[in-house]
């Protein structure tokens, strides 16, 4: 493992840093879980796209720079290090994008990927149903063939930012009478299609970007199917691997939080004196973020030698979600009563940001497959333990 950067990589880092220094929004954007913030983030991502910084690993013809994984890690370090806005089109760019690259037709790639990279199309993920969460093979929403269209009926739930999104990708039962992971198809559905009803769900942070999505005789062209008819499970498992693997949560995001936590510790001498364990907790968090970053570089090195990630993406998912929780819990301990202040309250300052992050961190062990399920995967597929 080479722990130094080449001159080209250093030049790339300098280029990213300079661009961000000139182009970052002057004021923080509103939360992307509000309509206003969602559109502000869309505009920011269009700007990233114009300068080919939106999807640096995508090929030039799709608006990217053809970067390798090391350059992507460098980009992310600079992006989060600069405090740039969180990425709003993650479902599209980080989950559906790689899925289309692997399974999409040339026409689908041309049609969807550049618009996705520019955030002209924002994507929601439609897998979970009221009775199909961890057990996703229990999906009952149907998509029945009628000529060159599917007719969709059913319901999806817990769909992140579906309240504002333009499109949804999801799994639907396309073979009547099929069971479990057989007979499912992976479809892309425009959320403005007749028969789609979006019902927002208020989240812990009081915002209603999360939604249930209902389908009543929604017609979707067969051309919107990714992969073969009835093979949706296979495609979706690849998408799930992208979600838990490296891309969704780059280490830089957590290193940035860890650095902010160290600053908060330094600015909170009274809390540190009151609770001597806090110093150790902060150090633990900082080391956890550094360890995750080093393990990411290690994984990237292995991928570069042609190895695969596979079931160890489940380890990744547990590491980042539990680390995020621990960092925000530690911040709450440092902030004491101030941690309860909402944005706009007197003396809230940085506390409201920590509270927002603390509330979101609660969901880390649930979304992208719960951590209990990830532990089952590790036990069975990596350790060979019995079911
Ligand atoms: C912030 C957030 C964003 C989300 N975004 C999306 C989205 O965009 N699109 C989407 O489709 N879904 C989304 N989800 C839904 C998420 O994928 C599900 O919540 C998750 O898969 C768990 O399903 P469930 O809620 O039905 O819980 P259940 O599956 O009912 O699980 C309940 C509990 O039982 C445990 N459990 C279940 N089965 C087992 C088992 N075999 N062994 C051990 N323990 C088990 C679980 O770990 C959990 O603790 C999101 C969820 C959150 C919190």
Image: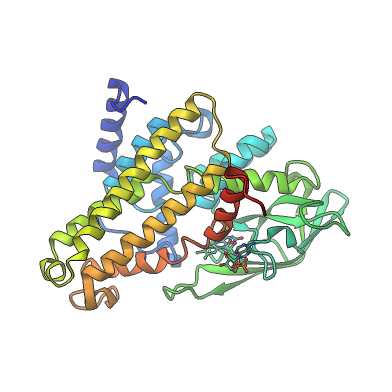
- 330 shown above or below 251: below
Residue 371 placed where, x, y %?
A: 52, 58
Q: Is residue 68 left or right of residue 23?
A: right
Quarter of the rendering occupied by the N terminus = top left
Give the residue at the far top of this rendering.
7
Q: Nearer the viewer, residue 102 or 22?
A: 102
Q: Residue at x 60, y 56 (%)?
A: 125
Ligand 1: image quarter: bottom right
Would you say residue 162 is visible in this rendering? yes
> Up-down: is 193 above or below 113?
below
Task: Pick whichever, 19 or 104, lies toward us.
Answer: 104
In the rendered image, the vertical position of residue 284 relative to residue 307, given as above or below: below
Name the quadrant containing residue 328. Answer: bottom left
Measuring 71% from the left and 51% from the top, which residue is drawn there?
187
Residue 290 picture location, percent across and down:
30, 44
In depth, the one of 333 and 89 nearer the eye is: 333
Above or below, 31 relative to 345:
above
Residue 214: give x, y in percent of width and height: 69, 69
Report the residue at 28% width, 48% height from top: 287
Name the side, left or right, on which 171 lies relative to 59: right
373 relative to 70 in the view: left or right:
right
Q: Position of residue 166 (x, y in %)?
A: 58, 57
Residue drawn at 43 percent across, 76 percent down: 206
Give the total of numbered labels.
0
């Amino acid at each position: 493992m080479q722990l130094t950067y080449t001159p080209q990589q250093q030049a790339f880092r300098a280029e990213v840093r300079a661009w961000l220094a000139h182009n970052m929004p002057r004021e923080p954007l509103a939360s992307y879980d509000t309509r206003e913030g969602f559109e502000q983030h869309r505009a920011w991502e269009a700007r990233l796209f114009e300068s080919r910084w939106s999807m640096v690993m995508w090929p030039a013809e799709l608006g990217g720079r053809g970067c390798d994984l090391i350059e992507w890690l460098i980009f992310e370090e600079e992006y989060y290090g600069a405090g740039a806005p969180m990425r709003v089109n993650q479902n599209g760019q980080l989950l559906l994008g790689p899925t289309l690259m692997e399974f999409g037709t040339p026409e689908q790639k041309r049609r969807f990927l550049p618009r996705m990279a520019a955030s002209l199309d924002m994507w929601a993920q439609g897998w979970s149903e009221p009775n199909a969460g961890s057990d996703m093979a229990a999906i009952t929403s149907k998509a029945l063939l009628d000529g060159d269209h599917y007719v969709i009926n059913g319901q999806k739930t817990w769909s992140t930012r579906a309240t504002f999104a333009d499109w949804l990708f999801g799994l639907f039962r396309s073979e009547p009478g099929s069971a479990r992971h057989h007979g499912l198809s992976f479809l892309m559905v425009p959320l403005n299609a007749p028969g789609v009803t979006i019902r927002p769900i208020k989240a812990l942070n009081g915002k209603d970007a999360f939604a249930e999505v209902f389908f009543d005789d929604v017609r979707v062209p067969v051309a919107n199917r990714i992969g073969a008819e009835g093979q949706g499970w296979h495609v979706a498992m690849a998408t799930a691997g992208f979600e838990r693997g490296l891309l969704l949560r780059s280490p830089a995001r957590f290193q940035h939080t860890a650095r902010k936590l160290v600053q908060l510790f330094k600015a909170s001498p009274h809390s540190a004196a009151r609770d001597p364990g806090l110093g150790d907790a902060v150090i633990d968090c900082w080391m956890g973020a550094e360890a995750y970053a080093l393990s990411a570089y290690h994984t990237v090195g292995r991928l570069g030698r042609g190895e695969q990630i596979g079931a160890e993406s489940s380890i990744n998912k547990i590491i980042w979600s539990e680390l995020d929780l621990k960092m925000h819990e530690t911040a709450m301990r440092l902030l004491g009563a101030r941690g309860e202040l909402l944005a706009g309250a007197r003396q809230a300052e940085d506390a409201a940001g920590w509270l927002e992050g603390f509330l979101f961190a609660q969901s880390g062990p649930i979304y992208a497959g719960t951590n209990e399920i990830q532990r089952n995967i590790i036990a069975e597929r990596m350790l060979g333990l019995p079911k």
